[in-house]
Amino acid sequence: MSRARSMSGTIPSMETSHDNLKDNTIIIVLGASGDLAKKKTFPALFALFRQGFLPRDAKIVGYARTKMEKDDFEGRATSYIKGAAEDKEIANAVESFKLTLSYVAGSYEDGAAFDGLTKHLDEIEAKYQSKERNRIFYLALPPSVFIPVAKNIKEHCYNSKGGVNRIIIEKPFGKDLDSARELLNTVKQYWTEDETFRIDHYLGKEMVKNLLVLRFANVALGAAWDKNSISNVQITFKEPFGTEGRGGYFDEFGIIRDVLQNHLLQVLSVLTMERPVSFSAEDIRDEKVKVLRCIPPIERSDTLLGQYVAANGKPGYLDDTTVPPQSVCPTFAATTLWIHNPRWEGVPFVLKAGKALNESKVEVRIQFKEVTQGIFKDIARNELVIRIQPNEAVYLKLNSKTPGLHTRAIPTEMDLTYKRRFLETKIPEAYEALILDALRGDHSNFVRHDELDVAWKIFTPILHWIDGQSGPRPHPVQYPYGSRGPKELADFMAKYGYKRS
Ligand code: NDP
Ligand code: BG6
């Protein structure tokens, strides 16, 4: 059970002494030879280690099929840690971090291999002082092996002698409603909801976490947060690179499954949910589910699909040798969601995401309604922009009087750019925040099973249409690599009342 403690100006924490792992903990990274482990998981574990956030004397064990000597594994696990070459303190910390690492090679299907892993865990734990032993299993693995691994670690590596066992799973959680239900239900046979932490790393991003505070700790914003004040909302994800090297994975999923159905829908749910009764994980997730249930499945007429083609010396999607020739997989999608509840009825929420665009940017743009005409003519709309990355910022576009003897209004900005306002503060990586939450037993920023169910209900019909399961597949429109997206996007946005300000 969790207990909330409130302090003035702080958000109540959800820790309990039992849930919050402080000692005797092993973090087992399965798929330790892979891309996610190297680029995100190990650097996040190092950052927590260096700042003293890992449990005392925590050990980290890598597991994968690839055979590696200890030195190779240590080199791989520390290869994405930044700053060691220039900073002696970081270099020393890396050396200390290596002392926590060890590696076991083994298959994902074979129970005996997991017995080998358990033998290694038992040896580490034999040196722990108290009887309590905690094991955190982090699955940095492709979904094809989630189920056998979840089963094998439960049957062969679960510590039932006292202590906590937790499993952390990465997206994708299925490909549609049926496959997600099958995956969730199978994992549930072995792991309880309380033991399971489903990562959507967008929930660990600083600005996404800030949404709750911006919304519910500011009366001024809260008062304008509904259909009476807001004309339209855009949630945008732009990446300046294509699927280079990941085409095989991407073609099976497409941009909607890769980004919209999870990352952008999570942002939408936090942006639009009602105020939770408390900051407990269940209260927050109850509200997210409630608002998602008010969203009907996406209409084809509310969707624009695109695929990038070669331009500016960069290859097109179909030039990637790992992509099937003739693929009509969308690498860009814009789609509009409607929330049928009293707060949001009639407000379009446009979710847009694309690969190989002109810039790297993720932002929420809330465009307010026109001021009543009469004393003003052609005056710009207010916009509140929450820039999630890069260069985190919140800014409000306001009309202000031009200084001087004339009374003229000009659009200006009230700007909270984090780099300027919080000079000394290091913004944690999403994975640091989420691994720490998992160690603390706080589920608030992890995806609950019913959130996934309702998310797939919204997206499955349009995905089946795109996959060609109910009639011919739509052909995405083309856009040049490095552009702002399909040229049809401007008309699409205008359809939902967006006006450039
Ligand atoms: P990888 O393809 O790098 O796979 C991780 C490891 O799993 C590999 O090193 C390999 O280890 C093993 N593996 C790979 N393919 C198979 C297979 N077909 N059957 C059995 N084992 C296999 O994946 P990532 O590290 O990129 O991703 C891991 C998970 O994280 C995925 O679910 C992905 O969707 C998710 N994710 C990844 C992100 C990223 O930036 N990479 C971002 C967000 C989520 P070995 O052969 O040694 O056993
Ligand atoms: C992953 C997607 O979930 O998120 C990738 O699979 C995408 O395609 C990535 O590039 C974006 O994450 P971030 O943190 O770089 O915005």
Image (cartoon, rainbow, N blue to C red):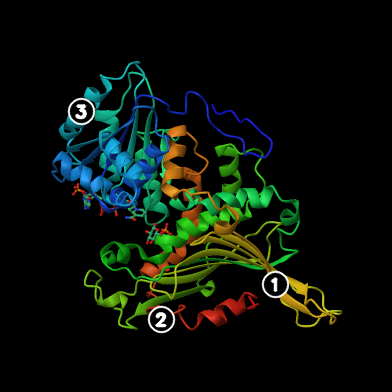
Q: Nearer the viewer, residue 306 or 183?
A: 306
CA gap between label 2 and label 1 equals: 33 Å
Query: Looking at numbered disc 1 in the image, what kind of residue is underneath it?
Result: Thr
| Type of the residue with mark 2 | Tyr
Asked which secondary structure carries label 1, the reply is strand
User: Mark 3 and mark 2 in contact (Cβ < 8 Å)?
Assistant: no
Q: Nearer the viewer, mark 2 or mark 1?
A: 1
The C terminus lies in quadrant = bottom right
Q: Who's the residue at 47% across and 23% down the image? A: 18
The quarter holding residue 89 reads top left
Above or below, 122 against 342 in this view is above
Q: Nearer the viewer, mark 2 or mark 3?
A: 3
Q: Which residue is mark 1?
A: 412
Left of 109 or right of it: where is 293? Answer: right
Q: Which residue is mark 2?
A: 479
Using the image, determine if residue 408 lies above or below residue 414: below
Dot 1 crowding, Cα within 10 Å, few <14, some 14–19, many 20+: some
Label 2 and label 3: CA atoms lie apart by 52 Å
Residue occupied by mark 3: 120
